[in-house]
Image (tube, helix red, strand yellow):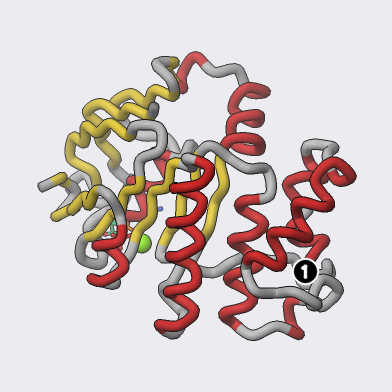
Amino acid sequence: MIEIKNIIKSFPNTPTPVLKGITLKIEDGDFVSLVGKSGSGKSTLLYIISTLDTPSEGEIFYDSKNLKDFRPEEIYQLRNRNIGFVFQFHYLLTELTAIENILLPARKANEVEKRRDFAMNLLNTVGLEGKAHRYPAELSGGEQQRLAIARALVMEPKYIFADEPTGNLDSANGKIIMDLFKKFNQEKGTTIIYVTHDVDFAEIAKRKINLIDGKLV
Ligand SMILES: Nc1ncnc2c1ncn2[C@@H]1O[C@H](COP(=O)(O)OP(=O)(O)O)[C@@H](O)[C@H]1O
Ligand SMILES: [Mg+2]
């Protein structure tokens, strides 16, 4: 379970805080969409929940343990083993093939051989069968994003955080990605939190969180 308590986030150049006291519980196996207007603080909140950024005030707990009390190697373990990240722009490595990109988190964890078969399965699951040895530049935008999702899933993380994962995709590719999230949530109990602008995609979640001007409504 993830709990965040009274999170405030200010940036040096913003006159008022971007997040104005956010308290939220995310249960294991939850499937949450985060919606709100552009500039309402969705990405900032997602980065803070997912350990990529730190709050100005407030606390974050993973399974009742305060993030402030995690040692650096514990944070590294949490990020690399238990968290999968998906961004609107996918940051694939252009000089690695599709399968090498998927296996990148496994390489960091020294589990390339252990995860290779699973990575191949994932490649097929995301509809890239036969394209293991293509480079990102040889794939369409939708295929690249699906590849990024396979990479986020290769360590079978407990949590997936996704910032507008379907933001630059057509609706058919967007649906493929949402279906994948649904499948992992149902079959593996993966906890999923995603930001979206799409009204229909937001409704797929079990729970919808709405941010207005840095506050939950
Ligand atoms: N690193 C930063 N430095 C200064 N201001 C920032 C930074 N990141 C975000 N902001 C500001 O915080 C507000 C919320 O941004 P963001 O969380 O990206 O919103 P959203 O994802 O909902 O569009 C915006 O006004 C944005 O300009
Ligand atoms: Mg954003």
Q: What's the residue at 76%, 85% (across, down)?
A: 138
Q: Quadrant of residue 12?
A: top left
Q: What's the residue at 24%, 33% (across, down)?
A: 24
Q: Quadrant of residue 5?
A: top left
Q: Quadrant of residue 215?
A: top left
- Label 1 neighbourhood size at 10 Å, few (<14), some (14-19), many (20+)? many
Residue 9 in the image: state x and y as whole percent.
29, 40
Q: Secondary structure at mark 1?
A: helix
The answer as to whether callout 1 falls within 8 Å of ligand 2 is: no
Q: Which residue is mark 1?
A: 98
**Horizontal arrangement in the rendering, residue 191 relative to residue 94 (left or right):** left
Vertical side of 201 occupied by 85: above or below = above
Q: What's the residue at 57%, 47% (across, down)?
A: 84
Residue 82 in the image: state x and y as whole percent.
58, 35
What amino acid is at disc 1?
Ala
**Horizontal arrangement in the rendering, residue 135 relative to residue 191 (left or right):** right
